[in-house]
Each structure stands twice: as structure tokens, then as C-alpha cells.
Image (cartoon, helix red, strand yellow):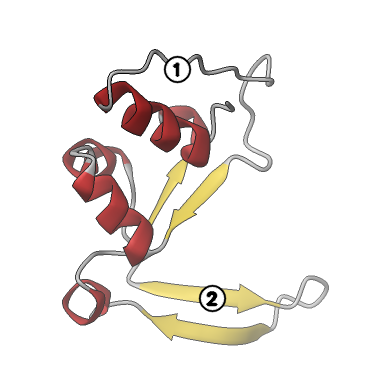
Amino acid sequence: MGGGIGGLTLALGLARAGEKPVVYEQAIEHSEVGAGISLAPDAVKGLRFLGVEPAIVELADEPMEQYTRHYQTGQPLVTIDRHNTASQFGASYLQMHRADL
């Protein structure tokens, strides 16, 4: 399994079930490009179930606002207020660097 959020989550679950999973990472080194991970509240709840939410929260950022911009002009297309995400959905919306996993 891979070394991304899905593969590491699967590996943790399998390890807790008594298996000995092997995780493979294809990247020789991590760079800034393509290394961002967004964790929706349901993903954070899954990580909570596995007991790793505190470690993830320590490394992640919880943005209070999220913007989607036009790729050429930079003009905002969508703005999301995330101030009430945790109270509304039962967990925060988090962002982190893949290498921090």
C-alpha cells in the first residue's frame, strides 16, 4: 500500500487487527508541489477512531476560511467560512503537508 493518507490509514487499521502491513512510498523525496493534504471532517473522525487525531491536529493547520480562485486571474470563485466546521460537523477541516504523515 502507498504512503499517502489512505495507505497509512489502512496500514494502521490492519496493524491494529494483528496484521503486519508493508507501506511503500514511491517518492524519493517530498517537494512542495502536490504535497498538500486536505482532511474533511469525516476523514478526521476516521482518524479519531484510529486514535491518531491528536497527532494529526498537532501537525495540521485548521483554516478558518477557504478560497477557490480562478487559475488565470486569481479572482475568487468560491469562499467557504470554516469557523463553525467543528461544531457543525463534529470535527475540524484540516490541511497538512504529506511529508508530515
- Residue at left offset 47%, top offset 55%: 38
User: Mark 2 sits on what residue?
Assistant: 67
- Residue at left offset 78%, top offset 71%: 71
- Residue at left offset 54%, top offset 34%: 4
Whichever of labels 2 and 1 marks the residue nearer the N terminus, that label is 1
Label 2 residue SS = strand
In the drawing, what numbered circle is on residue 96? none
**Residue 44 point in image, percent of width and height:** 30, 55
The image quarter containing residue 55 is top left
**Three-letter amino acid code at disc 1?**
Pro
- Asked if 78 appears above or below 15 in the picture, the reply is below
Report the mark closest to the observer, 2 or 1: 1
How packed mark 2 is, by other alpha carbons closer than 10 Å (few <14, some 14-19, many 20 or more), is: few
Residue furthest to the right in view is 72
**Residue 27 point in image, percent of width and height:** 68, 21
**Three-letter amino acid code at disc 2?**
Tyr
The image quarter containing residue 1 is top right
- Residue at left offset 50%, top offset 14%: 22
- Asked if 100 appears above or below 63 in the picture, the reply is above
**Residue 83 point in image, percent of width and height:** 26, 78
Q: In 3D space, how far apart are the residues under numbered discs 2 and 1 (Cα atoms)?
A: 38 Å
Left or right: 70 with respect to 8? right
Left or right: 87 with respect to 30? left
Residue furthest to the front in view is 18
Left or right: 31 with respect to 49? right
Discs 2, 1 touching: Cβ within 8 Å? no
Left or right: 89 with respect to 32? left
**Residue 23 point in image, percent of width and height:** 52, 18
User: Mark 1 sits on what residue?
Assistant: 21
- Asked if 76 appears above or below 59 in the picture, the reply is below
